[in-house]
Image (cartoon, helix red, strand yellow):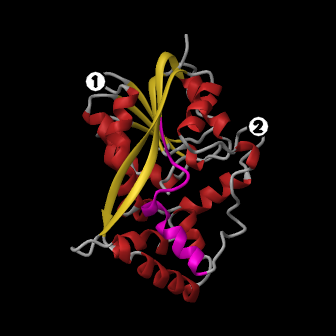
Amino acid sequence: MGHRAAADDGAADGPTPFDLGERRAWAGRAAAYEAGFGRLCAHTVPLLLDAAGVRAGSALLDVGCGTGAVTARALARGARVTAVDAEADMVRRTAAVAGPAGGAEVHRAALPRLPFPDGAFDTVAGNFVLNHVGRPRAALAELCRVVRPGGRIALTLWAVPAAPGQALLGRAVAAAGVARPAGFPALAPEDDFPRDVPGVAGLLRGAGLTGVACRSVIWNHRATPEEWWRGPAAGVATIGQTVISQGPEVADRIARHFRRLAIPFTGPDGRLVLPHRALLALGVVPG
C-alpha cells in the first residue's frame, strides 16, 4: 500500500508486467488513497525529511509524490521542491495543494527515467516509492544520477514480514480464499531484494551510495473499521484491485472476514489500533 511511481514507458525495455499492474491499481484513485492509506503513509514523512536533511533552501525531489504529503511538509521547511508521480490523478492532487501557489513544481514523470539533468537536486525523498517499481535497482540508479555529489537519498519501504496491522487486509483476502489477480503479477524474482534492514542497506550500497544507514520505524495507525475498509472497497492498491476484481458477492465475503479478523485490533472506542513497520534508509551520493 501507499502510492508511488512506476517504471517509465520510455525506459529501454519498457514497463514490466509488475509496473503495468501498479498503474492499473492506482489510476484515478488519488482521493480514495488520500482518505485512507495516505493517512497511514504520512506518518513517516517527518522522519524521511529529517533523514534527507531537508531545510530552508534545499533543492528536493519528491519522487512518487502521491497526494503531496512530502511536498507540503518540505515546503513548510522552506525547501525548493520538485514533485513527480507516474499517475496523473496524483499529480493533479499534489499540484492543487502545493503547486505554483504553494511554490512546488509538479510533473508527471516515472522511474526509472526522470526528465532532469545530472545532479539537479540536493536531495531526494521517496516515501514508499521502491515498493511500487518494477526495476528497483534501475530506479535507485536514476535517483543517484539526479542528485549532486554529496547529496542525500532518503527512502521508506514496507518491511517484510509485514507487521500485524499491515497484514490484516491480506489475511482477510486469504481467509476468503481469494488469490491475487493474474493481471497484477508480483515483482520478478531477479528484481526483488530482501525487505529487511540488511537487505535494504545492501541495495543502497550496491548502487554505490556511501554513509548508508537503515532502521525500522514502528507505529500504531488508528482508523475506524469503516475507514480502513474504504480503500480496498474502492480498489486502492493491489489489495483493493484484488477485492473488486472478484465481484460484489466475493467482495462482501472478504469484508465479513475483515470485520471478524479486525476484532482483536479494536480498542474500547471502536477504532482499530494497527501496528505497522517500515524501513527508513539513507545514502549519500559519492563524489
**Image position of 14 with respect to 252: above or below:** above
Quadrant housing residue 31: bottom left
In magenta, the rendered stretch is 155-176
Residue 283 seen by the camera: no
Residue 161 belongs to the span the image colors magenta: yes
Magenta span includes 160: yes
> For the residue marked with disc 1, what is the amino acid?
Ala
Among all residues in the image, which is located at the extreme bottom?
Answer: 249
Element class at badge 2: loop
In the depicted structure, whether residue 87 falls above or below residue 255 = above
Residue 113: percent from the left, percent from the top? 63, 35
The residue at which mark 2 appears reads as 12
The local crowd at label 2, few if under 14, some if 14 to 19, many if 20 or more residues have their Cα within 10 Å, is: few
Q: Quadrant of residue 40?
A: bottom left
Determine which residue is flagged by label 1.
56
Q: Position of residue 281 (x, y in %)?
A: 48, 34
Indicate which disc residue 241 carries: none
From the top left corner, tell me how far across and down residue 68 is, in percent.
Answer: 38, 46
Q: Residue at x 63, y 29 (%)?
A: 141
| Quadrant, the C terminus | top right
Secondary structure under the numbered disc 1 in the rendered image: loop
Residue 109, relative to residue 229: is it above or below?
above
The structure residue drawn at horizontal position 31% and vertical position 73%, both measured from the top left corner, is 266
Direction from residue 245 to residue 87 in the image, left or right: left
| Residue at (67, 56) in percent of width and height | 20
Q: Residue furthest right?
A: 13
Residues under labels 1 and 2: Cα distance?
A: 37 Å
Question: Residue lying farthest left?
Answer: 269
Counting from the top left corner in percent of width and height, residue 203 is at 62, 33
Q: Nearer the viewer, residue 27 or 264?
A: 264
